[in-house]
Image (cartoon, helix red, strand yellow):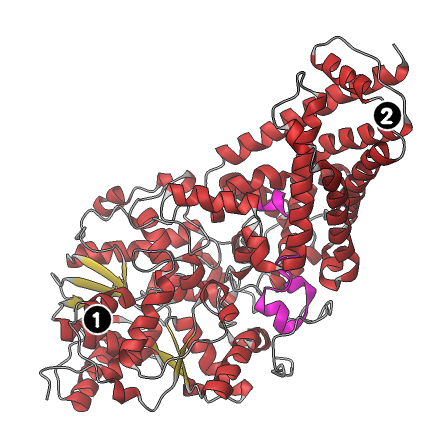
Amino acid sequence: MADFETPVLGEYQTIPHTHPGAMEHSKPYIAKPEVQKPLGFPGELVPDWENVAVMKLGELVSKSRALQVFLDSCVKCGACTDKCHYYLGTSDPKNMPVARQDLLRSVYRRYYTFAGKFFPKLVGARDMTKDVLDEWYSYFHQCSQCRRCSVYCPYGIDTAEISMAARDIMDTVGQGQKYCNEIIGKVFKIGNNLGLPEPALANTLEGLEEDVKDDTGVDVKFPLDVKGAEVLLITPSADFFAEPHIDGLIGYAKVFHASGTSWTLSSHASEAANFSMFIGSPENLHKQAKRIREAAIELGVKRIIVGECGHAWRVAYSFWNTLIGPFDFLDQRYPIPQHICEFTYDLIQKGALTFDKSQNDDKVVTFHDSCNVARASRMGNMPGGQFVIPREVIKACVNKFVDMSPETIHEGTFCCGGGGGLLTDDLMELRVKGAQPRMLALQRVVEEQGVTHMAAICAICKAQFSKVLPYYKFPMDMIQSVHGLVSKAIVLGPKE
Amino acid sequence: MSAVTVIYALLFYVATAILVIGVARKIFIYARTPQPLKIPTTPAPTTRLGVWMRMAREVTVFESLFKSNKWTWLFGWVFHLCLFVELAWHTRYFAEPVWFFVPLLHWFIVFTGLGFLGGLAGLWGRRFLVDRVRYISGPSDHLMLALLVGIGASGLSMKFLAHTDIVSVKAFFLGLMRFSWQPLPADPSLLVHLTLVATLMIVFPVSKLLHAPGVFFSPTRNQVDNPREKRWTAGWSAKIDNTKAAEG
């Protein structure tokens, strides 16, 4: 990796002047043939790939109203130009959402529109060439598909849809991204992103039971593959392994324990994440999600609850019913699927949980809204419940909670900088620079309100912040799982 | 029958046909193309009525643009509002007797011509003054603004500088609609105005002006946020049959 400088955090967010080419060197590793094959993609650039790419583009547009409308409707008004965290952090103009879209739109125009066929110069239409492909590979892997641009676009154009399409086309011609495709392969082969096989998983969970017993003296179970359990918990596999994720898993287990809910994990579907969304591949998206339906039927559960993971919650909330429904075999009295925060929140509302908030008195906590939860899903019954419910869960567990600046939370939240399949070491510069807007907002509440910790409900956010916080001179353990806070404060068993 | 009359009569028949057929074709394509997954930008309304209201705010007060940038919003909104009033006002050339709202617009029409040009000037200024917007502006973006400014300027010149015989203009357009051609006055500003308007009509279906019908079909804005309550399927997702997969 080339050396780079961590952005300096000023007093307030400034919009940089454009520096063309500032990030054109940024490229993730290309997937090797053995990584491509299990996903049904060619191992290397296919013969006549230019035509294959153009045909695929036409096919995708004909199958997606979103693409059809988004590619026609942009008027270049500039509303999105200062909204992308990667533009703010890198100042590369091709990281402005409209410019990123134009990398693909220019090719669409050339081959599929009257103006582009006959007046290419006038409307900026381009032939599909190797240079264009390389540019796609670089800049469509500088989009975390966070949808912040789509909030501000007067036509709701969502760059995430366009970057997914571009990645699908690149996979189709044989130029896939190693990080995402390798991970998807692991899910097909083993069942989770980490490649953690059943014995190792069982072992980990046993260890956790012992840890919690030592810690609290209570027998909190971490069941695996238990038939007839009430709840199947689908959670990102990072929860089995990484800090601070694992504190979250312990928190879920304690909430299940305290509420007397029987639950289980599944070794067949030991992954909530679905990276096939990032690469825009419907077949793989369906194939990955299907494991969860299979596990739920096999185990005979009545409910599915999803752990803390941003894009997984998008896939679960927005896509599961479409992809792996209908869920007529589950208990219709509960939301299908239900977010762990919804589950905990309901119990709190009912007064079914007891908390000792003072256990978290060493912390002043703020909350980072994860992009896919904020802008691509919901919790609870009302629009915006995804903002209210996690905060209410936190407030039930900590005495000191403050929010960051209004323009950096809720629907305007900034991506952590590592979403959308970019959470890989070969994109470290991009990840650090893309985190700049969030780090600035965090710095303000640290300085002005004494914030010590930032909680999140996304495995990618947690991993990204653990890595990136030190670049900005924050301690890496500043990032917390929401259910890690729950875990700390929840009172198990009878009150003393 | 003068050559000018014949040329402009034919021009407007052709332009109208291209506009109507071209836009209808696009609307047909948008309506026919499936949206396989639920992708509303959330928080989104959870009912159909809520979606209608969201869309109404989007197309009347440009809600999202307002969130984004107050200057772009101001210029864009003033321009579109004035354009809308001007279009309504211009129906007086196509209807006899004029429609009920036309006399009411008399009070606004003094300002809308200037607002139209002022809004465009602001939008065009951004394309030169803001480096990010300059970067994304292509030749067609400038030409489109030039076209609209030309329409506004030629229109205003007839209002304030050299009046044209609007009674004859109206007779010309009513004649076109009734297939009984009437002579068109050959005033230069009128001919410029009409040429540019016809050009705009012709390029409409092949240009970014498609944002006008497009916004109504934008899935991030027109979808109801109810994927858990109601199973959504369309296009490739409608072909999914999980019950079969489970048995097989």
Quick check: is B185 in the magenta stretch?
Answer: no
The total of numbered circles placed on residues is 2
A288 left or right of B3 in image = left
Vertical arrangement, residue A211 with respect to residue A351, above or below:
below
Give the quadrant of the N terminus of chain A: bottom right
Quick check: is A89 in the magenta stretch?
Answer: yes
Q: Residues within 10 Å of mark 1 (few under 14, many from 20)?
A: some
Q: Which residue is mark 2?
A: B164
The percent position of residue A231, horizontal first and vertical second, equals 18, 63
Q: Residue at x 52, y 68 (%)?
A: A407
Which kind of residue does numbered mark 2 sit on?
Answer: Thr
Q: In which image quadrant can residue A395 be found?
A: bottom left
Q: Residues within 10 Å of mark 2 (few under 14, many from 20)?
A: some
Say which of A292 and B114 sits in front.
B114
Q: Do the residues bearing badges 1 and 2 touch, measured as CB atoms within 8 Å? A: no
Kindly tell me whether residue A170 is visible in this rendering: no
Which kind of residue does numbered mark 1 sit on?
Answer: Ile
The percent position of residue B52, horizontal first and vertical second, equals 44, 41
Vertical arrangement, residue B171 with respect to residue A475, above or below:
above
B84 left or right of A162 in image = right
- Under circle 2, the secondary element is loop
**Which residues lie in the magenta part?**
A70-96
Marking on residue A348: 1
Q: Chain of mark 2?
A: B
Kindly tell me whether residue B76 is visible in this rendering: yes
- Under circle 1, the secondary element is helix
